[in-house]
Image (cartoon, rainbow, N blue to C red):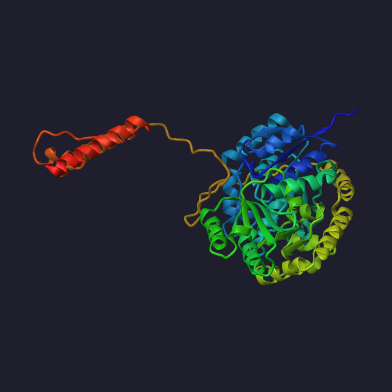
Amino acid sequence: MPEKKKLLLFSHVCNSRNVTGAEKLLLFNARKLSAYYDCTIVVPRQGSLSVLAKRYGIRTLLCENGLLYSMCAPHGNLAGEFHSIAWSEQVRRTVELLNKERPDAVLVNTSVNVSSAIAAKQLGIPVVWQITEVIASNEFTAEAVNLIDRYSDLIIGISDSVLLPFLGTQAADKTALLYPSWNPEDIHPDIWPAQRWHKRAAWKVKSTEVLVGYISSYLIPEKGADHFIAAALSVAGQYPEVKFVIIGAEIQSEYYRDLKRAVQGSAYPHRFRFVSFEDHVESAFNAMDIVVVPGILPEGFGLTALEAMVFGKPVVAYASGGLREILEAVGSGAYLVPTRDSVSLADKCAEMLSSMELTRSVGERNRAQVEAVFGPAAYDSRLLGLVQRIQGLSGVVVPLPEPAEPSPDAVDFHFPDSEVLPLEPEPTATSVSVKRAGRRRRMKLKRAKRLRRRRSGVGRSLSARRGGKGRVRKLVRHRRKSGRRTARARTKRVRGRHKLARR
């Protein structure tokens, strides 16, 4: 049997607890591609993704990366920021890793993970660049598309919405559509009733109550949790048997507090439940009756909606990006509403809640149609054609751009997900003398502060403040022991006070 070729799959993040949709998709890709390649996932740090990969027998490697979020939100200084990454330490370390591993191809996940693509093309290794988000449409979009085209040999889009910016460009011929799917062994219909009962019991939801759910890796404005709460509060008064669950980790404190305030300030706080982390999403979806996906920004695909329909749930969603594609493909386009229209979102939820028979029938139809359009069989067929294209790739070397002087109006660039600290300069005689002078100045300030405290009498006994020899007393709280001795001592003190009063 011929030895499998080696494929390195680069993840842009590896979160410690909550797994994002992009991480799930990369792991799914690795599991599927393992039938054709010797797959290794490269992560910037250890986390949930590396743990899950190990569980499925997939090797992982550590390599810090440089992310460029301007790739999905292009602006005027995109080329300058891209140039900064090209000459960064992250690219150099990735080149070292690639020289050591010598893969036959690399798969780069998300448009922002540019350092991996730059390093691979520098060595002439074929690059498969998987785009999972919709690149914002503006006057600089073409520049982002050209950069992806230059540093890739094949571009995978997870939806037509993702591939839209590439249509009509020279990169169009190297694009391929590959919808996400799921592994049949991860779905367990025989235990769904038990999962539903246990999860609803844990969330204190009765069997007679209806549960409307929202689920996201993180609670951020772009995912529309506030729109879900607004729609939920609109229908809560009309349907007293309905409860709501919001699943997602807090990452923006002020936004999270606003969500909690909106619920606590309403007349129905007892009917909402916030869950920061859900390890077993199958149980969570089975506990729900209706799933709402109010994504504000155009979704690359919408894995939440796909997963909900796999478990036979009706989905109400904003018609943004890939969400529109999914719901229209399975015949649930009637449950799409205009983006940011929480009133229409509430109306569609109310339509579902008014008839549980309708809710069940829509859920059953979703499950049947999603299997036909996005199921494992459909995915395997698309993947086979894609693998044939990957195996026919021959990498072209793209050298690093010439180093240029930074412009005075350039935007400061940083690597958001990198933990690399800048190297400190070698200490000189001047720097050492400056440090010593600073240390002496700090000591002098401390002595002056102590002197001021002594003169003001802070922390000193009354006799010391009057000019006596009292010392500064430390305030020490003694914890009294409970029991008879404490009671007797208290009685003694009270009697003593009474005697003094009588005198």
Q: Is residue 395 visible in the rendered structure shown here?
A: no
Q: Nearest the camera: 62 or 168?
A: 62
Q: Which image quadrant for residue 459?
A: top left
On screen, residue 165 above or below 61: below
Quarter where residue 95 is shown = top right
In this view, the residue in front, 501 or 187, is: 501
Residue at position x 54%, y 48% from top?
Answer: 404
x 59%, y 39%: residue: 90
Q: Position of residue 146 (x, y in %)?
A: 69, 55
- Quarter of the image with the N terminus in it: top right
Residue 475 in the image: x percent, y percent?
A: 27, 37
Compare residues 193 and 433 and report the one nearer the observer: 193
Does residue 476 appear to the left or right of 421 in the view shown? left
Q: Is residue 490 visible?
A: yes
Q: Position of residue 189 (x, y in %)?
A: 84, 46
Q: How many marks?
A: 0
Residue 246 placement: quadrant: bottom right
- In the displayed structure, 138 sits above or below 107; it is below
| Closest to the observer, 118 or 381 | 381
**In which quadrant is the C terminus drawn?**
top left
Instruction: Pinpoint residue 316: horizontal percent, then vertical percent.
Output: 74, 63
